[in-house]
Structure formats: structure tokens, C-alpha cells
Image: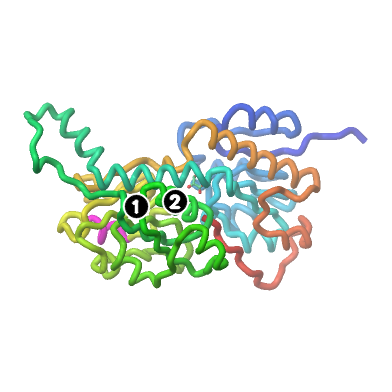
Amino acid sequence: MSWTPPPVLVTRRLPQEALDRIAARCDMTLYDGEGAMPRDQLLAQVAGKAGAITLLTDRVDEEFLQAAGPRLKVVANYAVGFDNIDVQACTRHGVLACNTPEVLTETTADTAFALMMAAARRVAEGDRFLRSGAAWIWGPLMMLGQDVHHATVGIVGFGRIGQALARRAHGFSMRVLYHDMYRPPAEVEHELGAEYRDLEDLLRESDFVSLHTSLTPQTRHLINAARLALMKPTAVLVNTSRGPVIDEQALARALQQGQIFAAGLDVFEREPQVHPALLACDNAVLIPHLGSATVTTRLAMADLAAGNLLAALEDRRPPALLNPQAREHGTSGGEAAELPHPRQPS
Ligand code: DGY
């Protein structure tokens, strides 16, 4: 019998090297539109596919899995975060769900540190000011910010990226506090010089708070009005995780009222929309979800996503598999009892 390449869907243009790798072994359908693939096209195009490379803008849920049909073996997300994927539903359908951990850790930690620096030292505001053409002369009280060096950083979510931020903080002689549902082994705390705090104490004590938690029902609006009120008026809040972890309305109010000094945000509650009240805050540094956006890292993510897809299609274990139990369910779509939800890595 002659070999026919498995049909796969790629929902957005990826670095060419990865597309070539996929196209060499699969019958690839690529959505080449400018934005995210429209839902109706996604559901129509995934029908009958054996695999899909999805983005954080594609919802992989029961409807998607039903639309795909029983041939679907793997969904390889081009992101470390997988709050767009219903992993339990994938498992029930015998579909392997994969993500791209590790390859973006350092780059995303760099972004978080850049936002800390930019927000504390008013970099974007200064740039806007100069471009406005306003008259200025050096002055002792002009655009004063907050020091980063020797300050205390509170890291919420102490997974890979949170820990990478802690390493950077030591280079600036910072004190490192952290909060996470999962305490790392004592050696890790020791190596990173990080002290555990409950969330409220961390917010009270920190000069910088950087969010690295995944988005789950428990972390939605983790940073709300009441928690913002615990922060210092000189504090800076940074988010490179997922937008809905912060109540943006409450944050905009805290920034307007000087309840905190500044914020640096890479992610937003209703991406790609940005809350108009945040756009109006000069003390908010806002960037369009660029956490992992370097040439090298995006290439590494594409390579890992392609590796996940191809491994699953060739009946090998994908390097970054979220639901190993799905392998036991085959691709027949057999119903399983409620399965444990994997921890969303950050
Ligand atoms: C992720 O990988 O989850 C980021 O948000 C995009 O790099």
C-alpha cells in the first residue's frame, strides 16, 4: 500500500524552516491570513485532519474536537501557555496536547525585566515626551522614577520563567520574594536566594511585583482592587503571563489614583483590545504580547511545535506532551472518567 502523508492544519504562518519541515512529511494546510484564523474557518479546515498546530488565539475545545473528527491525533500549541486548550477534552478524545516549554523561558524573563526597568525609569513616557516636541531642560526633579537595583521583587508564579527572573534580579542586587501554590525544593529556594511569602505579604513588601502564573479559574483576577490596595505607592506591577490575571479596570484606577507607581504590561484581558483607561495612563508601559518575540526564540518554538506534531503522527512520544494519558485512549474518541488537569507551566 502506498504511503499518504497525514493531513495537518497550521493556523498561522510560522518561521519558514518549521513549515518546510512539516510540509516535507505532511499534507499541510496553512492559514495565511493576517490575523487569527476565524472560528468558522478553523472548524471547517480542521475537519478530517490528523494533526494541528494551534496558537493561543485558537480555542481547542469540545466543539473543535468534534469538528476535527476521529482522525485527529495531536494538537501542538505554538505557546507554552495552554489556557486556550481544554486538555481534559483532548484526553477524552485520545488527542495528544502539546506546548512549547523551556525554549522561551529566558526570552520571556528578559521581557519582564525590560518592563520593570522601563516602567520604573519612565522610559516610554520619556520617549513620548521628547517626540511631543515639548520644551525641556535638565532639571533635578524632572521625571523621577524608582530604583531597580537593591529593590525587592515579588515573583508570583515561581515556575521556569519566574525563576529566570529571580536570576536576573540578583544581577541587580535585588531581594527576591516569591509566591506559588507549589513550593520548589529547598535547594532551589536556596540557590535563587528566594523567600516564600503568602500573596498578601508579598504584595505589601515588594517594590516590584512580576506575574508569571498561568491562567486558570483560580488565577483569573488574582490581582484585583483589594490586592492592588496592599501594594506600595512606589511599587511597579509587571505582567508577562496572561491578561486576565489582572482586573484591568481596577489596575487603571490604581494607576490613575497613584495607588501604585507604574505598570508594565505585555498581555491584556481582552487581547487584542487594550482597556482605554490603560491607554490613557502615562505610567503604564504597554507592549503587544511580545514576551517571546525574538527571532531565535520564535524559531525554537516553531521547531518544538513541529517536533511535537511530527512525533505524534509517527507514533513517537512528543517532546512536550501535556496529557500522556491520552495515548492510552487511542484516537477512537472513547469517553474517559474525569482526568487530572495538568499544571499549566509558566
Ligand atoms: C506563550 O508561549 O504562552 C506566550 O504567551 C507566547 O509566547
For the point 34% across and 71% down, the residue is 200
Of the residues tagged 2 and 1, which is closer to the observer?
Answer: 2
Q: Is residue 295 magenta?
A: no
Q: Nearer the viewer, residue 253 or 183?
A: 183
SS class, disc 1 = strand
Residue 204 placement (x, y as % from top left): 28, 68
Which residues lie in the magenta part?
Answer: 247-253
Mark sitting earlier along the chain (2/1): 2
**Residue topped by disc 1:** 238
Callout 2 amino acid: Leu
For the point 36% across and 51% down, the residue is 173
Question: Is 268 displayed left or right of 249 in the figure?
Answer: right
The answer to which quarter of the image holds residue 297 is top right
Residue 271 placement (x, y as % from top left): 38, 47
**Residue topped by disc 2:** 165
Callout 1 amino acid: Val
Rendered view: 89 above or below 80:
below
Label the magenta part by its dominant secondary structure: helix
For the point 28% across and 58% down, the residue is 207
Residue 327 placement (x, y as % from top left): 76, 58
Q: What is the crowding at mark 1: few (fewer than 14 residues within 10 Å), some, or many (at least 20)?
A: many
